[in-house]
Amino acid sequence: MKSENAGKNTSAVEITNISQHGIWIFVHDKEFFMPFDAFPWFKDAPIGKILNVELHSDTHLYWPELDIDLDTKQIQHPENYPLMSNTKSGF
């Protein structure tokens, strides 16, 4: 008898805190801070949509309800990605 493949690892990514300054996200045993100044799309987004984050690879994060893709490198060093939009979301 063969077992089915395991599903997605649901504990690999988690939003651990949201404050007036930004979002803390836990990815594979590391916690990152995403300040709203650098990631303005999240500032006015509903909490439920922020909490709905998927890990598509070891470093690729996706928020399907917000259509936002980020890599952990972008979160660690947003200054290295000047082409990221500075416009605020309309959520």
Image: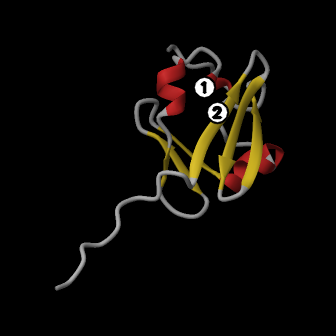
Residue at 65% x, 59% y is: 28
Q: Which residue is mark 2?
A: 85
If the image is split into quadrants, where does the N terminus sit?
Answer: bottom left
Vertical arrangement, residue 2 with respect to residue 52, above or below: below
Amino acid at pointer 1: Trp
Tell me which corner region of the image, top left, top right, bottom left or bottom right, holds residue 87.
Answer: top right
Judging depth in this view, the residue of 17 and 2 nearest the camera is 2
Residue at 52% x, 31% y is: 51
Sort mark 2 into few (<14), some (14-19) or many (20+) by Cα contacts within 10 Å: few
Give how far across and how far down residue 6 sits, in percent: 35, 68
Tell me, yes or no, whether the two marked residues, 1 and 2, touch with CB atoms within 8 Å: yes
Amino acid at pointer 2: Ser
Q: Residue furthest bottom?
A: 1
Secondary structure type for disc 2? loop
Q: Which residue is mark 1?
A: 41
Q: Distance between the Cα atoms at labels 1 and 2?
A: 9 Å
Give how far across and how far down residue 72 sits, in percent: 68, 53
Judging depth in this view, the residue of 88 and 23 nearest the camera is 23
Q: Earlier in the sequence, mark 1 or mark 2?
A: 1
Give the colouring mode of the picture.
secondary structure
Horizontally, residue 47 falls left or right of residue 64, namely: right
